Image: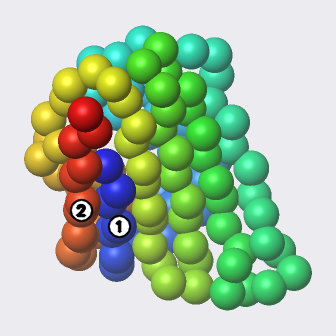
Amino acid sequence: MAIDVYGCDAERRESADALRDFAVEVCDDVLKMMRYCDSIIELFGLNDPKTAGYSLVQLIETSAVIGHFSGHRNSAHLDVFSCAPYDPDAVETFWREFFGGTHSTATFTTRQ
């Protein structure tokens, strides 16, 4: 699943602590999947404002949750990879509400 959220709350999008909270909540409460180790959260691209932002990787026992956050676009982008089933609508709603987004788009692919 790939989700793009626009019009985000900058304070949440630019807070490593908020991103850590997000990783725990989306995995434990929405996906209901076991987190494997702590999330990795790094700030990248500081030499170019168009690419600057945090990236998040949270390994889960069934694969990974990956997020990228853009200050330039005021957006948050999430990829959920999992071989276990989950509710994509619940993930999109949680993602948009957590980051205070004004609108979002999502693509869900089922692999055989």
The answer to which image quadrant residue 78 occupies is bottom left
- Position of residue 99 relative to residue 18, above or below, is below
Residue 106 — which label?
2
Task: Report if the CB atoms under discs 2 and 1 are less than 8 Å apart.
Answer: yes
**What residue is shown with label 1?**
4
Percent across and percent down for residue 4 are 35, 67
Res 30 visible: no
Percent across and percent down for residue 38 are 64, 22
The answer to which image quadrant residue 44 occupies is bottom right
Which residue is located at x 33 percent, y 25 percent? Answer: 83
Count of number-bearing discs: 2
For label 2, count other residues whose C-alpha is less than 10 Å away and answer few (under 14), some (14-19) or many (20+).
some
Q: Secondary structure at mark 1?
A: strand
Which residue is located at x 14 percent, y 35 percent? Answer: 87
Task: Please state which amino acid type lies under the numbered disc 1.
Answer: Asp
Left or right for 20, reference 111: right
Residue 45 — which label?
none
Percent across and percent down for residue 35 are 49, 17
Task: Please state which amino acid type lies under the numbered disc 2.
Answer: Ala
